[in-house]
Image (cartoon, rainbow, N blue to C red):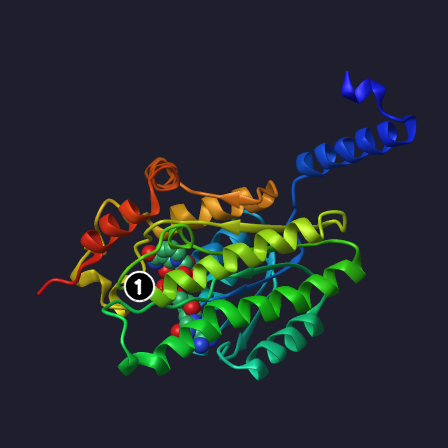
Amino acid sequence: MIFLRMHPDYRTGFSAGWISAIIASMKQLNFKDRWVVITGASAGLGAEMARYLAVNEKANLVLAARREDRMLALKEELLREVAVKIEVAAVDLTTVEGCDELFRKATAVGKIYALINSAGMTAYGKTSAEHIGMYQRIIDLNVRSVMHLSLLFLEYFQIQGEGAILNVTSEAAFTPTPYQNVYAASKHAIQSFTDCLRVEHRDRRVNICTFVPGGINTDMITDSGLSAKVDRDSFVNMKPDVAARKAVEAFKRGKPMAIPGILNKVNHALMWALPRRLKLAMAERFYRPPQ
Ligand SMILES: NC(=O)c1ccc[n+]([C@@H]2O[C@H](COP(=O)([O-])OP(=O)(O)OC[C@H]3O[C@@H](n4cnc5c(N)ncnc54)[C@H](OP(=O)(O)O)[C@@H]3O)[C@@H](O)[C@H]2O)c1
């Protein structure tokens, strides 16, 4: 009734807006022969997304991380299997110069169609002043570089008239996580940043999405020392190739926020429903480092 009583101009605007939103949500991204930039492509989820995009989607890739040898090996492996183009950018994304260099290199290879920010790091243990340097690097990589690259590429995509951004966050974006304190804060920041960016720019033909995994069986778990508490091979940690497939499939559909797997979905719903004090107490107990 309210709708019928609206002024015709509003009615048209309202329905046209909804129709274009529905059409946009039905329009899948098509990565074939298009350039996709992936950060964190030397290992873990980023490397697996690169594999999936090249082999299954026939995307051209710009692989970005610090370890050039690993990215060159991945490039060689993929080029043996599939006829796509792959460029490697060895950059340190904790620096502003590293982010600018990646943007410059990537946009010089061709028309970039999508950006995936997967590079990330965590640290496990009691939060203390002793580790301020490491926290700085976590913030620089997980927050500042993701904002920096998202904004540079968003502007580029808007000028081009199309494009897509996927920022990898974490279930830690929704749950305060003692003993991975700064990491969880960084993921809260990027989840919020990406959600706000999406609603601010919703009419610009640029898809802006997040992928929100729980644990994944990657080096991050061992490198951070978290494996002292949660076994890397534990069933709670998703296999990286499975997580990568789910990430790319959801990104293709332009899903604003994708949570992979039933376990993570249940955990997400539970964490949403529980009072914050209780969540914190449970998380502290779960992650408390072994003596
Ligand atoms: N593993 C999990 O349990 C889990 C859970 C939830 C969310 N995530 C998120 O998933 C994403 C991928 O993590 P992962 O599990 O794949 O971790 P990973 O296996 O440790 O890989 C991290 C990637 O980030 C890159 N990287 C680290 N420092 C960098 C720097 N300074 N400059 C450029 N690249 C850098 C690494 O490459 P180089 O070392 O070669 O630079 C590597 O390619 C992260 O955003 C993470 O927060 C992971």
User: Total marks drawn?
Assistant: 1
Task: Name which residue type carries label 1.
Answer: Gln
Judging by the rendered image, the residue that carries numbered circle 1 is 180
Q: Is residue 165 left or right of residue 142?
A: right
Q: Is residue 240 left or right of residue 234?
A: right
Q: Is residue 194 visible?
A: yes
Q: Residue most toward the left? A: 291
Placement of 253 over or under 104, stated as above or below: above
The image quadrant where one finds the C terminus is bottom left
**Residue shown at 53% from the left, 42% from the top:** 250
- Report x, y in % for residue 186: 44, 64
Crowding at dot 1, Cα within 10 Å, few <14 / some 14-19 / many 20+, comes out as some
The quarter of the picture where residue 47 lies is bottom left
| Front residue (pair 141, 197) | 197
The image quadrant where one finds the N terminus is top right
- Report x, y in % for residue 152: 67, 69
The quarter of the picture where residue 82 lies is bottom right
- Report x, y in % for residue 274: 33, 39
| Front residue (pair 33, 175) | 175
**Residue shown at 65% from the left, 45% from the top:** 29
Cβ of mark 1 under 8 Å from ligand 1: the answer is no
